[in-house]
Amino acid sequence: MPECLFCAIVAGDIPADIVLRTDSVVAFRDIDPKAPTHILVVPTEHHSNVGELSEQAPEAAAAVLQAAAEIARMEDLAGYRLVFNTGAEAGQSVFHVHGHVLGGRSLTWPPG
Ligand code: AMP
């Protein structure tokens, strides 16, 4: 099994509630949701954070953004927030880049 949690989910070694899968991305429901819709979108290839993804695999970065928009349509969200926590100080705890698609309730600004 891969050491990376999200690589293991992509590989099917760890179960997840997968809502979308393509050759380049997998999206699954967050195990600890912070909103009625809280879905994580990850590239199938391992990259640590969104900066590295955009530099090393710009097509995969675009695929993540497109998947987020598709998920918002699938979930019938009037609006959504797409968050990439980048670095431990910003709250990143899993170092396989993932976009959080959050929606289904009114979201306040600024985030904490
Ligand atoms: P971050 O803190 O930005 O790195 O986000 C990591 C997210 O992964 C958190 O929102 C966790 O709730 C979520 N998470 C951790 N383990 C799992 C899992 N096995 N399946 C789904 N989501 C998970």
Image (tube, rainbow, N blue to C red):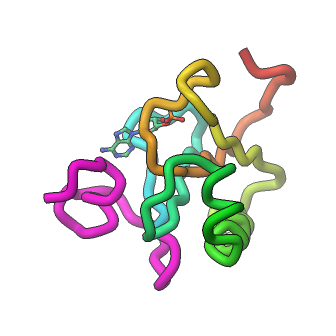
Against 3, residue 75 (above or below) is below
Q: Is residue 94 left or right of residue 100?
A: left
Q: Hey, which residue is sitting farthest right in the picture?
A: 109
Residue range corresponding to the magenta coloring: 1-25
The quadrant of the picture occupied by the N terminus is bottom left
Q: Residue at x 54, y 59 (%)?
A: 41
On the image, the x and y values in percent for residue 80 come to: 77, 48
Q: Which residue is drawn at 32% across and 59% down?
A: 7
**Is 61 above or below relative to 47?**
below
* Residue at the farthest left position: 1
Instruction: Please indicate whether residue 43 sits to the left or right of residue 86 in the image.
Output: left
Q: Which residue is drawn at 70% across and 61% down?
A: 54
Which one is nearer the viewer's eye here, 19 or 75? Answer: 19
The foreground one among 13 and 101 is: 13
Residue 12: % across, % down: 23, 67
Rendered-image quarter of ligand 1: top left
